[in-house]
């Protein structure tokens, strides 16, 4: 069986189980709708996961859970920071775009990094240069122009865990 087919079967099974868990599998309509949604998700995303390494799945899953909690913590901190800016209008802001470098080589990991940065209040991923492994981030408050420092401040909080999950 091809890796792409295996990936699609795995995605279907996980998506279908998640659907049943979230809807409590009450009636036949929920089961059929869940199967259809899981099939569509599997057909669309299965090809992206075909190259995903199969070894260390439990370890990677543990880091994925850790990533989820890290993301929530960073989002809470960013919300408090942005609320402070909004509630204290005299507080200086210095918006701008900074460049950060990433060591991630996996496209899915780089996309998740960019989306995580964008979903964190006060930052927005403007562009990704995958060849140079660079992201351009708009920040409410730019603290400096040093690429290494910006990478450490913005990207490292997510990147280290993503490397464990995807590479």
Image (cartoon, grey):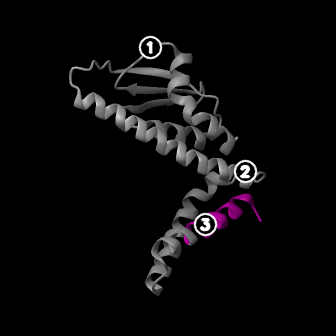
**Quadrant in which residue 127 is drawn:** top left
Choose the circle earlier in sequence order: 3 or 2.
Answer: 3
> Does the residue at mark 3 contact the one at mark 2 (Cβ under 8 Å)?
no
Residue 159 vs 12, above or below: the answer is above
**Location of the N terminus (image quadrant):** bottom right
Q: Going by the image, does 154 lie left or right of 7?
A: left
State how far apart marks 1 and 2 are (Cα).
36 Å
Q: Going by the image, does 139 lie left or right of 104?
A: left
Q: Of residues 98 and 82, which is closer to you in this image?
A: 82
Q: Of residues 74 and 2, which is closer to you in this image?
A: 74
**Location of the C terminus (image quadrant):** top right
Residue 11 covered by magenta stretch: yes
What segment carries the magenta color?
Answer: 1-16
Residue 123 vs 37, above or below: the answer is above
> Pointer 1: what residue?
144
Q: Main secondary structure of the magenta part?
A: helix
Mark 3 or mark 2, which is nearer to you? 2
Q: Position of residue 156 (x, y in %)?
A: 57, 29
Q: Position of residue 2 (x, y in %)?
A: 75, 61
Residue 36 vs 98, above or below: the answer is below
Please tell me how crowded label 1 is: few (under 14), some (14-19), or many (20+) other residues with Cα within 10 Å.
Answer: few
Q: Give me the residue at 56% from left, 23% from top.
A: 152
State how far apart marks 1 and 3 are (Cα).
43 Å
Query: Could you say which disc has been placed on residue 59 in the image?
Result: 2
**SS for dot 1:** loop
**SS for dot 3:** helix
Query: Could you say which disc has been placed on residue 48 in the image?
Result: none
> Pointer 3: what residue?
14
Q: Of residues 96 and 81, which is closer to you in this image?
A: 81
State how far apart marks 3 and 2 are (Cα).
17 Å
């Amino acid at each position: 069986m091809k890796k792409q087919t295996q990936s699609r079967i795995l995605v279907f099974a996980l998506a279908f189980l998640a659907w049943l868990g979230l809807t409590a599998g009450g009636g036949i309509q929920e089961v059929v709708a869940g199967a259809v949604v899981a099939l569509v998700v599997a057909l669309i995303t299965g090809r992206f996961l075909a190259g995903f390494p199969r070894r260390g799945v439990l370890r990677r899953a543990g880091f994925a859970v850790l990533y989820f909690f890290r993301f929530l913590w960073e989002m809470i901190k960013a919300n408090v920071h942005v609320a402070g800016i909004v509630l204290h209008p005299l507080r200086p802001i210095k918006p701008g775009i900074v460049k950060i470098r990433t060591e991630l080589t996996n496209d899915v990991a780089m996309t998740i990094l960019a989306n995580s940065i964008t979903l964190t209040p006060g930052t927005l991923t403007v562009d990704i240069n995958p060849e140079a492994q660079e992201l351009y981030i708009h920040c409410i408050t730019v603290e400096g122009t040093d690429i290494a420092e910006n990478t450490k401040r913005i990207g490292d909080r997510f990147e280290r865990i993503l490397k464990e999950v995807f590479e």
